[in-house]
Amino acid sequence: AQSVTQLGSHVSVSEGALVLLRCNYSSSVPPYLFWYVQYPNQGLQLLLKYTTGATLVKGINGFEAEFKKSETSFHLTKPSAHMSDAAEYFCAVSDQRGGSYIPTFGRGTSLIVHP
Amino acid sequence: NAGVTQTPKFQVLKTGQSMTLQCAQDMNHEYMSWYRQDPGMGLRLIHYSVGAGITDQGEVPNGYNVSRSTTEDFPLRLLSAAPSQTSVYFCASAGVGTEAFFGQGTRLTVV
């Protein structure tokens, strides 16, 4: 069965500092990996995705993530945090297990950005 | 292009009442799913469907029922609402190898 672990329920950074949100997954087949962002009282918006090909994936709002198969990781980074990045971030994995592309989500990491 | 349309946005139920959350997608996606979101728990899968006429249980199916008579629609039924079902519910759809597209969510309170 596929699963996702997000290390740290809360991450706090200063504006302008590096953002690093950690995600590890397990999957018995090559996975598809995603990062979503959720702003307060809103739905989920896709930040970026890895399906096949280049392991370094660039997304919206300056975020990027690197798929490392040997470490089963897909950490999310951004060089310089903005106040507007404060939100909940979810890592998700899906694969063709049983013919399904239904994603499994991690518990989320709340990003707090201090002035 | 509407994407995933989920209704209602807000609902208050009394314990024991039943209701249906509606979900429709216009992207011809095969895969549809329902999640509930609770603080600190992320999104947990309730039920999902891999095509019309095919449904299966997810992680937290108890107290919920689904059907998929068409590709477009995937309603979620609460059979007898309980306070433990107070949550935010999201419907999602996906195609082969695509990301999941989400509805705007339903905030349900059971009193």
Image: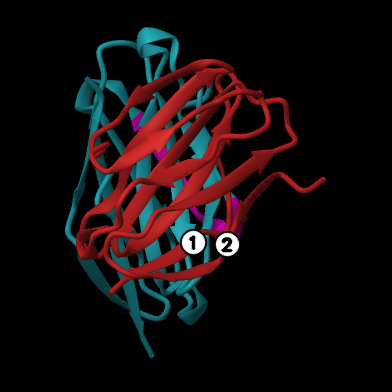
Chain colours: A cyan, B red
Q: Is residue A66 magenta?
A: yes
Sequence-first tag of 1 and 2? 2
Quarter in which the C terminus of chain B is drawn: bottom left
Label 1 chain ID:
B
Element assignment for label 1 = strand
Q: Residue furthest front?
A: B16
Residue A27: image quadrant is top left
Q: Secondary structure at mark 2?
A: loop
Provide the residue designation for mark 1. Answer: B106
Q: Which residues are magenta?
A: A60-67
Position of B51 relative to A94 (above/below): above
Judged left or right of residue B14, residue A51 is right
Residues tagged 1 and 2 counted as in contact (Cβ below 8 A) = yes
Q: Residue A54 lies in magenta, yes or no?
A: no
Question: Which percent across, then down, holds residue B90?
Answer: 47, 51
Q: Which residue is mark 2?
A: B8
